[in-house]
Every structure is written in structure tokens, then in C-alpha cells.
Image (tube, grey):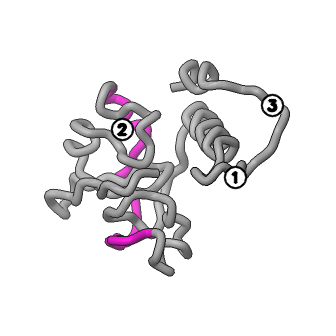
Amino acid sequence: MGSAPAQIPTSFGHELRACLRCRLVKTYDQFRESGCENCPFFKMDDDHERVVDCTTPNFNGIISVMDPTRSWAARWLRIGRFVPGCYTLAVSEALPEDLQAAANWVMFLELKKGDGHGNKILETGNHMDENFIAQHI
């Protein structure tokens, strides 16, 4: 992902929500205005109902991560590849199946693309493309 930090929640009350895929924590309004910095393919800023589908107010704990690539806690929580920001320790819900399938294909395509140094992380003969993602998001 990118290195620009995510928005920091503007309040820590009942309006906080966590992304069901990456566990980034922001307010409902922040997700509605700018989406999720780790999951732009969900297009939460274009479809306000998507914010409700892709986020949850039911989560436990918050951790602020300034440098995910160097943080042992970020690696342990499996958020080391995400942007700096506030994350939840655990969510209490699952991403809907259609959105999970699309997120899995995005992750597959990222792995197939490589690590940015010319090294492919995943080799496969399957040639699914972004049309699958567009149909399911």
C-alpha cells in the first residue's frame, strides 16, 4: 500500500467504525468523505451505503501505528503492509461474501504484481482480471 498516513479519527465516541478488511478505524463521516486508504477498491467515498457494508462499529481495542513496516505489533496484527493510522485489534463481524471475494481477487492481483522490485510474490496461470472485481464491487 502507500506510505501516506490515513486520517486520524476526529472523535473517539460511538461514531467510530472499523473497515472489515483492513481494520482501519475512522469515523463514519471520514469513511464517507475519503473512503478507506487501504481498500480504495471498495469505493466507500462514491457509495455511502458501502460504508455500512464494509465497516462496523463492533470492534475491540485501538492501536495507533506510525511506521507499520517497523512495528512488531503491526506485523503481529498483520497490518504491516497498510498505511500508518489507527487500527482495531479485532472486529466482531465478517465482510459480506461478495465483497470478500472481490477483496480476495485484489489481494491476488497485488501478489501476482510483485513486491515492487521485479519479484513476483505469486506465480499462477490463472488470468482473472479487474473485470471480476468491477462486477462484484
Please, what secondary structure does the residue beneath circle 1 have?
Answer: loop
Above or below 32: residue 116: below
Asked if the magenta segment contains residue 50, the reply would be yes
- Mark 3 crowdedness (10 Å alpha carbons): few <14, some 14-19, many ≥20: few
Q: Which mark sits nearer the N-terminus, 3 or 2?
A: 2
Asked if residue 117 lies left or right of residue 52, the reply is: right
Packing grade of label 1 (10 A; few <14, some 14-19, many >=20) is few
Nearer to us of marks 1 and 2 is 1
Quadrant location of residue 11?
A: bottom left
Asked whether the beta carbons under mark 1 and mark 2 sit within 8 Å of each other, the answer is no
Q: Amino acid at mark 2?
A: Val
The residue at 33%/57% (across/down) is 25
Mark 3, secondary structure of its residue: loop
The magenta region covers: 47-68
- Residue drawn at the location 24% of the way across and 54% of the way down: 7
Residue 52, numbered label: 2
Return the residue at label 3. Answer: 126
